[in-house]
Image: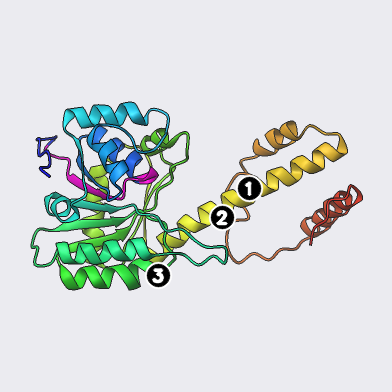
């Protein structure tokens, strides 16, 4: 198919977004709204047809209207031709799924397939490009599985891991107001190119930039999600205990959250400290004992 090559703001790059699921669709529409020309790559026929007609393939408040506007303006295209999209792009973002099974093993088939396709598409290319892996992948994936394949095919590219922090229901707001902009790369020359690309893409976004090594970036994304899971579980357990004791769980957790010095803060989140002291063990045991009185069992 013919891709719309309409001129956009000169300082903004052309971005190929491989994978137009939730992260890809939100990111593409947001980037287009900031002046990038975005080419979404999607092989699923139904999603592709929707994108080519200006419809969002996923539901997110405000996304349908933005996709329609960006498509009509010529800033957001869609194709199933990965090679054509990649050759037209300055920056390539990979946002394909990486599901895990019940045992925690991550399925990297999609990202391995895309990496192989990128290596073939970029072979003999001399134009410098930046490849950003948006997918959540186990630590070491970028350094050991992705970089060697891509660099062997095209030495002129820079590769990094670039995790996303988009929440369903507020993803567009999260894009424009993220808590931080994180990326991880290992080659010093790559870091220069990636740093320039990041500051160009996010020039209108007010958030701290946190460059890391690729393994640190990959693990940091998992650390965030695991911590969110812990917080949800913790709040639910305190809520259950509060209900059993006749206390208002919402008021307890609201008061708890007001402490940004210790409770909602970096305090106690520095590796190396031992669990101990006079208060933490005894008070944890006390509430476990109280919960046991109401039939709430912990191991």
In this rendering, is residue 291 above or below 149?
above
Q: Is residue 16 on the magenta stretch?
A: yes
Q: Position of residue 246 (x, y in %)?
A: 86, 34
Q: Nearer the viewer, residue 36 or 24?
A: 24
**Badge 1 vs badge 3, beta-carbon distance below 8 Å:** no
Q: CA distance from mark 1 to mark 2?
A: 9 Å
Q: Which mark is residue 140?
A: 3
The mark that comes first in sequence, 2 or 3, is: 3
Circle 1 SS class? helix
Q: From which residue to which does the magenta span run?
A: 10-23
Q: CA distance from mark 2 to mark 3?
A: 18 Å
Circle 2 sits on which residue?
A: 226
Residue at (78% x, 32% y) in the render = 248
- Image-based side of 240 in relation to 111, left or right: right
Q: Is residue 123 magenta?
A: no
Whichever of callouts 1 and 3 sits on the residue coming sooner in the sequence is 3
Q: Residue at x 39, y 55 (%)?
A: 97
Q: Residue furthest right?
A: 293
From the image, which quarter does the C terminus lie in? bottom right
Q: Horizontally, is 71 left or right of 213 in the view?
A: left
Where, quadrant-wise, is the N terminus in this rendering? top left
Q: Which mark is residue 231?
A: 1
**Which of the two residues, 64 or 223, is positioned nearer the viewer here?**
64
Q: Secondary structure at mark 3?
A: loop
Q: Write down the quadrant of residue 243 in the picture.
A: top right
| Image position, residue 244 (x, y; %) | 85, 40
């Amino acid at each position: 198919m013919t891709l719309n090559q309409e001129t956009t703001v000169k300082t903004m790059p052309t971005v190929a977004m491989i994978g137009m699921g939730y992260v890809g669709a939100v990111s593409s529409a947001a980037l287009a709204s900031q002046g990038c020309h975005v080419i979404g790559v999607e092989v699923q026929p139904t999603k592709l047809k929707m994108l080519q007609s200006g419809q969002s393939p996923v539901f997110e408040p405000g996304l349908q209207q933005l996709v329609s506007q960006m498509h009509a303006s010529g800033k957001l295209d869609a194709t199933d031709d990965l090679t054509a999209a990649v050759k037209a792009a300055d920056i390539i973002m990979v946002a394909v799924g990486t599901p895990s099974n019940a045992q925690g093993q991550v399925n990297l088939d999609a990202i391995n397939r895309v990496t192989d396709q990128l290596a073939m598409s970029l072979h003999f290319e001399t134009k410098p490009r930046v490849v950003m892996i948006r997918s959540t992948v186990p630590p070491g994936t970028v350094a050991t599985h992705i970089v060697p394949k891509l660099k062997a095919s095209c030495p002129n590219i820079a590769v990094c891991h670039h995790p996303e922090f988009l929440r369903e229901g507020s993803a567009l707001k999260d894009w424009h107001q993220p808590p931080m902009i994180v990326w991880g790369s290992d080659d010093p020359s790559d870091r220069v190119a990636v740093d320039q690309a990041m500051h160009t893409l996010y020039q209108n976004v007010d958030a701290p930039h946190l460059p890391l090594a690729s393994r640190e970036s990959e693990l940091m994304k998992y650390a965030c999600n695991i911590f969110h899971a812990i917080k949800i579980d913790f709040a639910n357990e305190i809520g259950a205990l509060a209900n059993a004791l006749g206390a208002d769980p919402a008021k307890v957790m609201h008061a708890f959250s007001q402490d940004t010095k210790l409770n909602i803060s970096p305090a106690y989140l520095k590796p190396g400290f031992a669990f101990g002291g006079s208060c933490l063990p005894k008070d944890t045991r006390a509430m476990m004992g109280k919960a046991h009185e109401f039939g709430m069992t912990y191991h």
